[in-house]
Image (cartoon, rainbow, N blue to C red):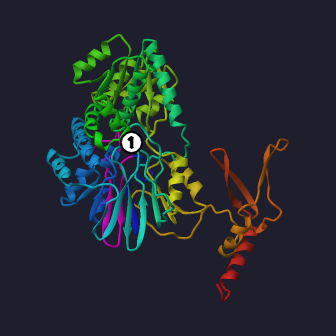
């Protein structure tokens, strides 16, 4: 089994991954880079010419995973695309919007006919159904993150690899957390996203509380609130939070507008109610009212509606795409409302390094941010409004990713879908126990444990390690702070075998307030040389 990342390896965007299997090739996802136009936004799909896919899985319908699909079908018109029912429904809207936007930009990615042929290739598949029609086998598991999103368990030649897709281990109002096996289920490899591999996100419940409080402060002061949002998933979650808060009196009852692609997506969510969490279904049955489109919610129909909202004097909330202020309706409201100190713009999702949303968060109040002007360019806009970020992410954080990976106890781990720092940080936590790879786009990586542990700190051979594990499993280790030397002092039990630790410089790693690991940063070369001689001697013995 081998892996090639066509895109979405050391970046969040253009996700596309190819598995070279004994029985054939499996392609997972084909997305675009947000903010890029034309061929520059695509993964390295030319690699498929050398390794044509036998089948394809679409993990979910976000732009960075789905928007390149018609380009793939243009080259492989008979390719079957497996996904969940919800993903198949939502993907059609995302692809239609991609065609519209790319045409307006002057770089249409595909034709309406190619879009139609792509939708015809979808094969809706229930979670937990094992597909083995192509020689290799795969199964879709709920991954949280988004309605219909899936992780993929791949089986080939008696080996297995778990592809996480975009994953979240936290329940939200509109999607349940990722499914995990009750017992540890060992696999040969895990290919994991790493979007927040360097971050321990704050409590989601606390973030929602402060988010609602900040909106309330702005509205009660007579201001307007803009929430740039991903149209798919995040907008529906925000709508639920706002509706519930208004109904309970936590927020004043003001007009709540949905603009851009959020309109069609929210209508589709209303139609997909049977696939949403049971709590929402129960609410619909008891109230008889629409879940997303009731109360003060208004869909912005056209430019005239938008102009009326912009010209209005009273407080209001607008949830509009795009979430990074790249394009769509959200920059229109931002240009009008950012210059007024009484207004607010609240960021609720991931912002890539080059996005206007990221630049806005980095500004001092009153600075200028470059926003799309609707004519293909950007113009500076002064930002005096209140700007804050709230972590309502649909991705697992570092702790969530580590916990998920541990459930599958892989020998090999590939980290994808993350910027340089998150990937490297997460790799640092994993590489003492696993063979970790950070693939580049186009690189062929073997999904087999090489036996290397790049950050290993145990100074002992495998034979000795097994014998030592049980003896020292319950050993007590005291950690004290030495105020004079401004250092942590670790006192090991006298019975602890000194050969567990080699001479050298160690780093101490703490996860969620608990001592999690000692890691040898730099070995003493004389000690290391002695250890290698000892290992060579054992290897050459008759029993070895």
x then y, percent, for residue 498: 78, 66
Q: Which residues are magenta?
A: 13-39
Left or right: residue 173 versus residue 488 is left
x then y, percent, for residue 191: 44, 58
Left or right: residue 38 versus residue 150 is left
Residue extending farthest to the top is 313
Q: Is residue 322 visible?
A: no
Which residue is located at x 36 percent, y 41 percent?
278
What is the secondary structure assignment of the residue under circle 1?
Answer: loop
The verdict on residue 29 being magenta is yes
The verdict on residue 169 being magenta is no
Question: Would you place residue 313 above or below residue 510 in this image?
Answer: above
x then y, percent, for residue 402: 54, 53
Quarter of the image for residue 176 reads top left
Question: Would you place residue 476 above or below residue 392 in this image?
Answer: below
Which quarter of the image is occupied by the C terminus?
Answer: bottom right
Residue extending farthest to the front is 286
Left or right: residue 45 versus residue 398 is left
Q: Looking at this view, is 125 or 540 the one in front?
A: 125
Quarter of the image for residue 470 reads bottom right
Q: State the count of labels.
A: 1
Residue extending farthest to the left is 113
Disc 1: which residue: 175
Q: Looking at this view, is 312 or 208 the one in front?
A: 208
Q: Is residue 337 visible?
A: yes
Which quarter of the image is occupied by the N terminus?
Answer: bottom left
Mark 1 residue crowding within 10 angstroms, few (<14) / some (14–19) / many (20+): many
Question: Would you place residue 103 above or below residue 443 in this image?
Answer: above
x then y, percent, for residue 42: 31, 49
Residue extending farthest to the right is 484
């Amino acid at each position: 089994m081998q892996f090639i990342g066509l895109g979405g390896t050391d970046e969040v965007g253009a996700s596309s991954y190819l598995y070279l299997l004994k029985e054939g090739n499996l392609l997972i996802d084909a997305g675009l880079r947000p903010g890029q136009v034309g061929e520059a936004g695509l993964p390295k799909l030319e690699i498929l010419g050398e390794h044509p896919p036998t089948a394809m899985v679409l993990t979910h319908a976000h732009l960075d995973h789905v928007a390149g699909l018609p380009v793939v079908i243009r080259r492989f018109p008979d390719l079957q695309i497996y996904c969940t029912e919800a993903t198949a429904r939502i993907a059609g809207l995302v692809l239609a919007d991609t065609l519209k936007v790319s045409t307006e930009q002057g770089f249409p990615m595909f034709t309406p006919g190619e879009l139609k042929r792509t939708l015809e290739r979808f094969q809706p598949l229930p979670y937990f159904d094992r597909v083995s029609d192509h020689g290799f086998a795969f199964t879709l598991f709920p991954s949280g993150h988004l309605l219909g999103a899936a992780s993929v368990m791949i089986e080939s030649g008696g080996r297995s690899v778990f592809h996480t897709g975009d994953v979240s281990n936290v329940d939200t109002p509109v999607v349940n957390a990722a499914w995990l096996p009750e017992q540890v289920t060992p696999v040969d490899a895990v290919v994991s996203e790493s979007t927040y591999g360097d971050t321990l996100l704050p409590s989601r419940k606390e973030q929602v509380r402060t988010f609602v409080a900040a909106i309330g402060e702005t509205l009660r002061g007579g201001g307007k609130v803009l929430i740039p949002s991903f149209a798919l998933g995040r907008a529906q979650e925000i709508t639920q939070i706002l509706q519930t808060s208004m109904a309970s009196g936590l927020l004043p009852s003001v007009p709540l507008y949905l603009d851009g692609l959020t309109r069609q997506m929210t209508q589709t969510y209303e139609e997909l109610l049977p696939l949403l969490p049971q709590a929402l279904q129960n609410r619909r049955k008891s109230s008889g009212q629409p879940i997303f489109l009731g109360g003060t919610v208004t869909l912005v129909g056209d430019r005239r509606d938008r102009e009326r909202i912009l010209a209005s004097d009273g407080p209001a909330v607008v949830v509009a795409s795009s979430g990074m202020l790249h394009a769509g309706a959200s920059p229109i409201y931002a240009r009008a409302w950012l210059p007024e100190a009484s207004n607010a713009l609240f960021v609720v999702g991931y912002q890539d390094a080059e996005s206007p949303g990221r630049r806005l968060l980095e500004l001092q109040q009153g600075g200028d941010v470059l926003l799309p002007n609707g004519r293909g360019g950007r113009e500076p806009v002064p930002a005096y409004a209140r700007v804050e970020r709230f972590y309502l992410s649909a991705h697992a954080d570092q702790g969530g990713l580590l916990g998920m990976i541990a459930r599958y106890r892989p020998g090999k781990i590939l980290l994808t879908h993350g910027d340089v720092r998150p990937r490297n940080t997460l790799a640092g936590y994993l590489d003492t126990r696993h063979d970790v790879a950070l693939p580049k786009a186009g690189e062929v990586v073997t999904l087999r444990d090489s036996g290397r542990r790049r950050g290993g700190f145990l100074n002992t051979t495998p034979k000795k390690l097994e014998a030592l594990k049980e003896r020292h499993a319950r050993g007590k280790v005291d950690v004290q702070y030495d105020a004079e030397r401004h250092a942590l002092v670790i006192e090991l039990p006298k019975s602890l075998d000194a050969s567990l630790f080699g001479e050298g410089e160690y780093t101490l790693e703490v996860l969620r307030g608990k001592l999690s690991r000692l890691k040898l940063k730099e070995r003493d070369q004389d000690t290391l040389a002695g250890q290698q001689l000892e290992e060579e001697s054992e290897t050459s013995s008759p029993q070895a």
